[in-house]
Image: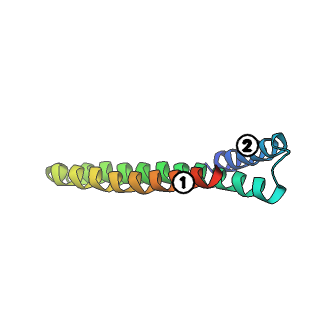
Amino acid sequence: MKTMIKNVLVASGLVALFGATAHAQAAPADTIGKGLAAIGAGLAVVGGGLGIGLIGKSAVESIARQPEAAGPIGTNMILTAALVEGATLFAVVVGLLAAL
């Protein structure tokens, strides 16, 4: 898992670096900032995906231990996942707006 995240970060950095060289008319500091903003938006998506995955994992484990509580656990899981997804979407929008 750590190597996958590391590979994603390296690939994102290379894309930002080569994207920065394509925009020769922009100032270097401005281009680097835009690349970092795009990487931040990508990291927000990765973090949100990991968070929602952990929420689902915990909910399934809880239902397996106490099947009679499946209804309330499922409701709380969906509510929590929606909140995490909303925060992730907000972070992605902010990151992409900063990259423009």
Dot 2: element? helix
Disc 2 target residue: 11
Query: Neighbour class for label 2 at 10 Å: few (<14), some, many (≥20)?
Result: few
Q: Residue at x 49, y 51 (%)?
A: 50
| Residue 86 located left or right of residue 66 | right
Q: Which mark is residue 44?
A: 1
Disc 2 to disc 1, how far (Cα)? 16 Å
Callout count? 2
* 86, above or below 15, in the image: below
Farthest residue, direction front: 25
Q: Which mark is residue 25?
A: none
Residue 67 in sight: no
| Residue 69 located left or right of residue 20 | left
Q: Amino acid at mark 1?
A: Ala
Q: Earlier in the sequence, mark 2 or mark 1?
A: 2
Residue 37 in sight: yes
Query: Neighbour class for label 1 at 10 Å: few (<14), some, many (≥20)?
Result: many
Farthest residue, direction left: 68
Percent coordinates x, y for residue 61 in the rendering:
32, 51
Q: Residue at x 72, y 58 (%)?
A: 33
Percent coordinates x, y for residue 3 in the rendering:
68, 48
Q: Amino acid at mark 2?
A: Ala
Q: How is the image coloured?
A: rainbow
Q: Residue at x 81, y 43 (%)?
A: 23
Dot 1: element? helix
| Residue 86 located left or right of residue 48 | left
Is the Cβ of the residue at disc 2 closer than 8 Å to that at disc 1?
no
Percent coordinates x, y for residue 95 in the rendering:
58, 54
